[in-house]
Amino acid sequence: MFQILKARLHQGYRTFPFPEKQPPMAPRYAGRPKILPGSCKGDCAACVGICPTGALSRGAGNRPVIDLGRCIFCRACEEACAEKLISFTQEFSMAANSKEALVIADEKFKQAEAMGNELRRLFGRSLKLRQVSAGGCNACEADTNVLGTPNFDLARFGIQFVASPRHADGLLITGPVSQNMKLAMQKTYEALPSPSIVIAVGACAVSGGLFKGNSEVNDGAAGIVPVDLFVPGCPPHPWTILEGILRFMGRL
Amino acid sequence: MKNTLLLKNGSSAKLENVPVIEAEGFRKHLTVQIQKGGRLSALFLVPGDSQARLFAIVSHDHTSELEVFSCLCGRKFNALTPILPQAHWFEREIAEIHGIEMVGHPWMKPIRFQPKAGQNVEIIPGATSYFEVKGEEVHEVGVGPVHAGIIEPGHFRFQCHGEKVFHLEIELGYQHRGIERAIPVSQPQKVIRLMETAAGDTSIGHATAYAMNVEALAGLKLSQNAAIIRSVALELERMANHTGDLGALAGDVGFLPTAAYCGRIRGDILNTTGLICGNRFGRGLIRTGGVGYEIDAELKKAILDKLALVEADLRSAINLIWDTPSVVSRFEETGLVSREDAIAAGLVGPAARACGVSIDIRLSHAFAAYGRIKPELALGRQGDVNGRATVRWLEIQDSLCLIRAMLEELSAEKAGCSMPKAELATDSLAVSLAEGWRGEICHVAITDSKGNLKSYKIVDPSFHNWFGLALALRNQEISDFPLCNKSFNLSYCGHDL
């Protein structure tokens, strides 16, 4: 007992005061990218060619466009761009209500909006989620799980992961939705009491990510269940997931 | 032709130099090598124009050699499993993917529920025959694929008598994403990313094994600093996961102090990896021919400072486990696996070491910086939950020593960050082993006549170890399943690929 108390004193209070303070990100962290003003040199499409997930394309004025839903934040395009038009920032806030809002063509980004008033009345102060991993590689799962640790302390916001869909207000889905998990995921969704919400976390769950186009997967959750919040990243930083959920609950 | 080819870890050979033995000789040779102490690291089939070829990779830990041999395989193959239990899962995999009939295999059924090559039939995962125990008061418990926590999916079926488990059968495949199939048809810049997601908590381990194969096939030499940075990252990965596991083990017996502290400390270790490459899981850190990020003097100091805090927190949090008799008594003699069973089933990593089996690829087949800076072998006496927990704690402490020693050896040179357009040797085979935090990771690459990857085999340590979990549950209380499961903490996606 004495050792337990001693350890308690040593470990101290470690919950980060989010959202009052902005958490520090690692200097090399690749956050939400922006496309700076300027134009590409001629037919250069180096960024499009180097992108491992096909997240890059060329839009108006042949300038680069990044689909954050497919991006794995590897910075290959940033390195490849001779004109230095692509820049990954330290900004970790990047959840959105639609896949379209994740497409970035300049320095602007439309952050996620809160759920409707009726849903907010029900879930704004207490949100119980069921997590379904459907082909996730255990990175998104781990960085969702970590939200329960004292550093993030998800429970202080009234958010909790529960053991049955019957007790849940919504699903948090990770992975590209493997063919072999499609049925189980559908059944889990159908077991939710209505109304319910769905959150897709990570490039795989948003778009299929690295597995997009594989016959073994379904290119993300949105083709199978209606998704209300998309959280990009490979995996998203825990702060990105938490910030997205809080924004969606109307708490930020 | 000699019926054997011996390779060093992370080297390649022309396919024509890989011995082809006739099927009966192949079976005999493989059996003899395993009886002599070798381990079956991989057994896989490569379809050919005329006939498929079956390859075996046997690890000889005492001589640091990897033995490669093959045989031509028709539609039928006399199963090795009855005399060689290590082949059990491999033969089921080959039968499932390629439709080869494994004659005499005692328990032939799918391991992933994937359609056979070239067939497009609807498959219902989990729908197969299971062991059944019949009799009064015997009952069956099915769990999954969706579990109660934030965990990957899998199906577990228990045959019980009251609380006692006679047998646990594990059916996976829910995570199958088609990684091995996608590798030969993907661009190199995508392939290394696929490796990082083969098992996302082992990004460094799998990317390292892949990079070693590409380097062997392209004749690239790793700089000393790159080797060090890879090893540092691999040790951080080991520390983070072992710490998370120890916390989760404490949580599963209801001991919340260690559970709460370790969950946070694990994050601090992941953040240390984040200091090196910006990503908590080390994504983008390993590149073929080198590493993507440098460690300069300033970063080295930041890592060491962070690790000093982590070490103090870890000692305070984890020693509580062994200071608390009620925790230790729940760990001891729970989930026993005998040394004999561990060897026969071919277990690897901490799960094997906990049973007193001394295998550690970092020592037996040194790679990256482990040739010069050697780890201490962590062994358990009894293959129980306590053994698996003890091995993890010993390894965490050793990783701290290794990282400090390695960072000391960093020179001022650049580690090398290029990802050169590597020209791979044609018609060749490369094999690499790496000791990930779960154990031996084996990758085998085979190129075609143009130097493109024709076939790529990934063996995650979980592939060897899932059967170990089934063995650990025999004669246990079913309520001990979460504790036993966590003490192995195996990868679902690493198995399902």
Image (cartoon, coloured by chain):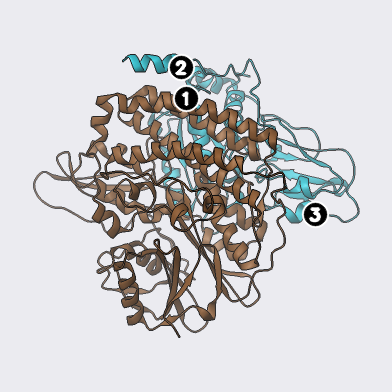
In x, y percent, where is residue A5? Answer: 37, 14
* Quadrant in the rendering for residue B320: top left
Q: Residue at x 30, y 37 (%)?
A: B483
| Amino acid type assigned to the residue bearing label 2 in the image | His
Say what secondary structure mark 2 lies in: helix
- Residue marked by disc 2: A10
Query: Is B497 on the left or on the right of B90, as rendered?
Result: right
In x, y percent, where is residue A252? Answer: 63, 19
Q: Is residue B134 above or below residue A229?
A: below
* Mark 2 or 3, nearer chain start: 2
Disc 1 crowd rating (10 Å Cα; few below 14, some 14-19, many 20+) is some
Disc 3 crowd rating (10 Å Cα; few below 14, some 14-19, many 20+) is some
Q: Camera-side residue: A102 or A237?
A: A237
Q: Camera-side residue: B152 or B436?
A: B436
- Label 2 close to label 3 by CB (< 8 Å): no
Q: Camera-side residue: B249 or B35?
A: B35
C-alpha gap between disc 2 and disc 1: 8 Å
Q: Which mark is residue A46?
A: 3
Q: Chain of mark 1?
A: B
| Amino acid type assigned to the residue bearing label 1 in the image | Asp
Of marks 2 and 3, the one in the foreground? 2
Q: Is residue B276 above or below residue B460?
A: above
From the image, state the color of chain B: brown
Query: Is B344 on the left or on the right of B112, as rendered?
Result: left
- Residue marked by disc 1: B313
Query: Is B464 on the left or on the right of B278, as rendered?
Result: left
Q: How many marks?
A: 3
- Label 1 close to label 3 by CB (< 8 Å): no
